[in-house]
Image: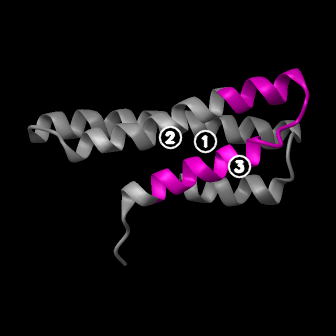
């Protein structure tokens, strides 16, 4: 199966943004939403840098940044699930795409 990772990362970021447009009005919900959107958008944007990498070493470094940001997103989604900030079904779908 052939995936366009660039599109998937952009779509994933857009889906998170749309979900959090209607975020919980609690302090925790607001904090975690902002904390999730930053690294998720960063992973999509940094993947653009991967595509323009000047060497294999540079490409691997930039990919490692993307992976680091996605790991942060996964931890954030796990916390939100455990805190019950959203329906687990919505977050499970997002976690699956994050993984």
Q: CA distance from mark 3 to mark 2?
A: 18 Å
Residue 67 lies left or right of residue 95; in this view the side is left
Question: How dense is the environment of label 2, judged by Cα within 10 Å: few (below 14), some, or many (20 and up)?
Answer: many
Task: State the SS at label 1.
Answer: helix
Residue 70 got which mark?
2
Judged from this view, the residue extending furthest toward the bottom is 1
Residue at the spot 11% in from the left edge and 42% down from the top edge = 56
Q: Which residue is mark 3?
A: 18
Q: CA distance from mark 3 to mark 1?
A: 18 Å
Residue 44, compared with residue 99, is above or below; it is above
Residue at 43%, 43% (x, y): give it: 44
The boundaries of the magenta stretch are: 8-34
Q: In the image, 32: left or right of 45?
A: right
Instruction: Write down the quadrant of residue 22 in the picture.
Output: top right
Give how far across and how far down residue 11 sits, in percent: 53, 56
Spot occupied by residue 93 in the image (x, y as percentages of width and height): 69, 60
Picture layout, residue 66 above or below residue 1:
above
Q: How many residues crowd around disc 1 within 10 Å: few (fewer than 14), some, or many (20 or more)?
A: many
- Name the residue located 85 percent from the left edge and 46 percent from the top edge: 86
């Amino acid at each position: 199966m052939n995936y366009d990772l660039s599109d998937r990362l952009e779509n994933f970021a857009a889906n998170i943004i749309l979900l959090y447009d209607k975020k919980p009005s609690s302090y925790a919900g607001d904090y975690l939403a902002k904390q999730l959107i930053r690294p998720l958008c960063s992973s999509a944007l940094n993947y653009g840098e991967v595509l323009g990498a000047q060497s294999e070493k540079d490409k691997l470094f930039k990919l490692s940044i993307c992976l680091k940001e996605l790991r942060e997103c996964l931890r954030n989604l796990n916390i939100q699930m455990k805190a019950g900030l959203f329906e687990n079904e919505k977050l499970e779908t997002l976690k699956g795409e994050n993984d």
